[in-house]
Amino acid sequence: MKRNVLRKLPSGETVNVQPFHISIKGMEKAILCRDNEDYGVMVKYIAVCAHRKNVIVIIYAVVSNHGHVAVLAKSYQEACEYGEELKRNYAQWFQTKYLEKQILRGVDVQAILLDSDWYVRNALAYIPRNALDNGYPIDKYKWSGFRAMFSNKNQPVNGIPVCKFTRREQDRIMHTREDLKNVHWLVDSDGDLIPESFCDIEYLEQVFNNDPAFWLKTIGSLNPAEMEEKLVNGPRRLLPDSEFYKVAAEVVQRWYSQDLATLSLEKKLRVLPFIWRTRKTTVRQMARTFGLSREEIQDAVKAPGSSISQQK
């Protein structure tokens, strides 16, 4: 499979892009989507913010207290900016509708580069599996992009073109004043976005060798607790040194098929920024793990100099 592919972005630019997993998670007891309107708005903002921030949605799933989106983006920075834009837009919707502000302060965005075939396949299977969190079978859940997978490409997708909306219709149905005159999205008779019209189904299906049986095999062997730890919870938590070493060693093994203890300085400096961006850690912990000075770590990851004295 091809993880990095050539794609035409919403801006019209054709470039190589990489897959990222983005999770938006609220406080444990926070319900971010309280009714069908909320779910529909979150899905629309997934599409609108991708158009605005110049990324491509692969697949998504929205459940009551969190959401997952896989996107193709030029860089980690642009994937993060997309996640933050999605959070900002939905926060405005939530606060306007429910007049509640405090609850959104607990919402966190985390982006992870899917840097191996294993990560891509398992992440893209894990995302629609989140339908089970809302008590629905994966193939019956309305608020995920699963419905677009392995759809009959010979059958036209029926829907109302978003690009044909008047400004008033767009404000009412899409909840945005973004210029959507050039998009090919469709909404159904309920006013909900049709995933086939805005998700990169070609990329999604080629990850599973264009074979529904292979997708079923992947999701059947998926360890959801492992994926939640790797993609959602782990990156948000400061680990003890022993656990952090295992995480760093796993990344090194994926990147170089080599043990961390035998890694050259050149390779260490190459992998350090990735681990710094995708894991909650400190300069001192990174120095202990990689056997380097704090100054070397700081220079490699561009951490602020003033923070070194505060790291524990």
Image: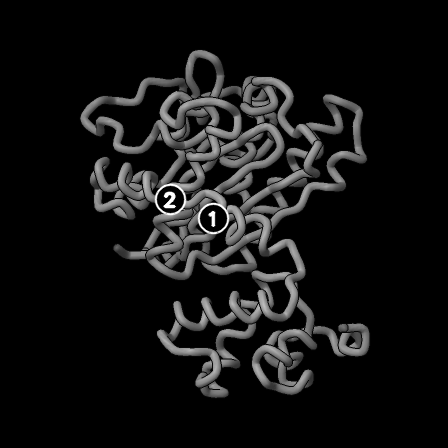
Q: Considering the numbered disc 2 on the image, is that residue within a helix, a strand or a loop?
A: loop
**Residue drawn where x is 80% and y is 24% of the image:** 99
Residue 184 appears in the picture as rendered: no
The amino acid type of the residue labelled 1 equals Met
**Camera-side residue: 7 or 215?**
215
Find residue 29 and report its horizontal and vertical position in percent.
Answer: 70, 32
**Residue drawn where x is 40% and y is 34% of the image:** 198
Label 2 to label 1, Cα distance in Å?
8 Å
Q: Is residue 302 above or below residue 175?
A: below
Quadrant of the rendered image containing residue 286:
bottom right
Q: Residues within 10 Å of mark 1 (few under 14, many from 20)?
A: some
Q: Which residue is mark 2?
A: 222
Q: Residues within 10 Å of mark 2 (few under 14, many from 20)?
A: some
Q: Which residue is mark 1?
A: 227
Report the side of 156 relative to 12 (left or right). left
Q: Is residue 175 above or below residue 290?
A: above
Q: Quadrant of the C terminus?
A: bottom right
Outermost residue, left side: 154
Find residue 90 and report its horizontal and vertical position in percent.
Answer: 65, 33
**Camera-side residue: 247 or 172?**
247
Q: Is residue 73 above or below residue 244?
A: above
**Residue drawn where x is 50% and y is 87% of the image:** 265
Find residue 36 and report its horizontal and vertical position in percent.
Answer: 57, 18
Find residue 69 and report its horizontal and vertical position in percent.
Answer: 49, 42
The amino acid type of the residue labelled 2 equals Leu
Q: For the residues labelled 2 and 1, say whether their Cβ atoms are less than 8 Å apart.
A: yes
Q: Considering the numbered disc 1 on the image, is that residue within a helix, a strand or a loop?
A: helix
